[in-house]
Amino acid sequence: MWLDFRIIPLFAPFLPSREARASTRSRTLKIDTVLPWEDPSWDRFVEAHPAAMVYHSSSWCKLVRDAGGYEPYCLMIRNAEGIRGVMPLLLIRSRLTGSRMVCLPFSDVCYPLADSNDTARMLVEKALDLSREEQTSYLEIRGAPAVPGSGTGAASPECFKDLEFSATHHFNNYIIPLSKNTEAIRKALHRGQRQQINKSYRVGVQARIGKGENDIREFYRLYLLNRRRFGIPPQPRKFFSELLDRLTENPKSLLYIAEYQARTAAAIIALRYKGVCYGKYGAAEMAFRSAFPLHALLWKLIEDAALDGEVAFDFGRTATDNEGLNAFKSRWGTWCEALPYYFHPPKEGLSVVKSDSLKYKLFTGVVRRLPLTIHERLGSRMFRHFG
């Protein structure tokens, strides 16, 4: 069969215009695996997305990738008009804990960012394909995909429809809305919290921004003691040194120190990104708990963030079965949000092991009894396997 091109003009009114064909091509989406830290357009998209968090930034992704030696499979969808969606994704290969794709290890919450539900669906489907190709045990996504108007990690559950994901609600998050009216923030705290902050300053606790190797060393000393007390292997000191060295602007890392009786009594590493201050890592000296140094330090961190124009303070994830920590964070004028994690195939992954399980109790019981030097070495060897 042949076509006489001389008759094409007769059909021209019924054919798509050049502009329409160009528009169709511009809507054609292409999905690739990329290295976010080598593509400046990644951070431009993330910074412009209303639901992006510090864990979506290329700097954080590279820090985690380098620390764990993980394989990057970060996804980007684009068309002729620009980027339409991204998904940080790393592959953990471990003989100890198995292989899995995670969005994103060592991150409280991280989910695909997209301009529409259809784009988000494409990201999730591509992540599933990669997980199958690499023969992993499961794919883990720490939050539902977010599109403009869906809120921070708010449900776009249709993206998971018919894909056989399971949702696990093992974590809560606590957020303090901030403004430059720090007195109003203070009044929103539970009365007991205000009294403990006042007592802390009254007995001589001093809070300041830390700097230098000595302050990092003091933070890590308290961090090791706290992790052993809870029976959890620590991340290596090098991770925190790298974090403070690399994240200097956007996102920005800060070390806060509380001193009491000429000794370091509490320390916090915080992150700031897109108007949010994250209280990411904290530790306190149990011998000084009656002086409430952590209360003074948290208030210093919150007050500084508010006065600098940040709009929220993020306490970080808390296991729902940790009644004490949930109660503590709820007394700071916070609002609570659930942090669902999604798994395919349906299961509960390593990140949501419950504290009342026999394996958890046995493991933490052993770790609590380790000498501090062995505890530190154990963490250096094991941390990458957990993510």
Image (cartoon, rainbow, N blue to C red):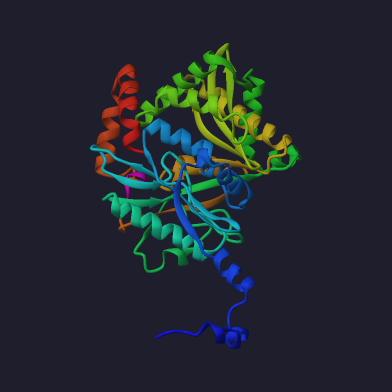
Q: Name the residue: 42% across, 58% down.
A: 124
Tell me the magenta residue range: 348-352
**Viewer can see residue 334:** no
In the rendered image, residue 361, in percent from the top left (x then y), is placed at 28, 38
In the rendered view of the protein, which quadrant contains the N terminus?
bottom left
Query: Is 222 placed left or right of 100 in the picture?
Result: right
Q: Main secondary structure of the magenta part?
A: helix
Q: State the residue in front, 373 or 99.
A: 99
Q: Position of residue 63 (x, y in %)?
A: 47, 33
**In this view of the protein, can residue 169 be seen by the observer?**
yes
Pinpoint residue 264: horizontal percent, then vertical percent. 54, 17
Residue sitting at x 46%, y 21% = 220
Asked if residue 103 lies left or right of residue 84, the reply is left
Which percent across, then down, holds residue 262? Answer: 58, 11
Of residues 356 and 267, the one nearer the viewer is 267
Residue visible at 26% across and 50% down in the picture: 135
Residue at horizontal 50 percent and vertical 17 percent from the top? 218
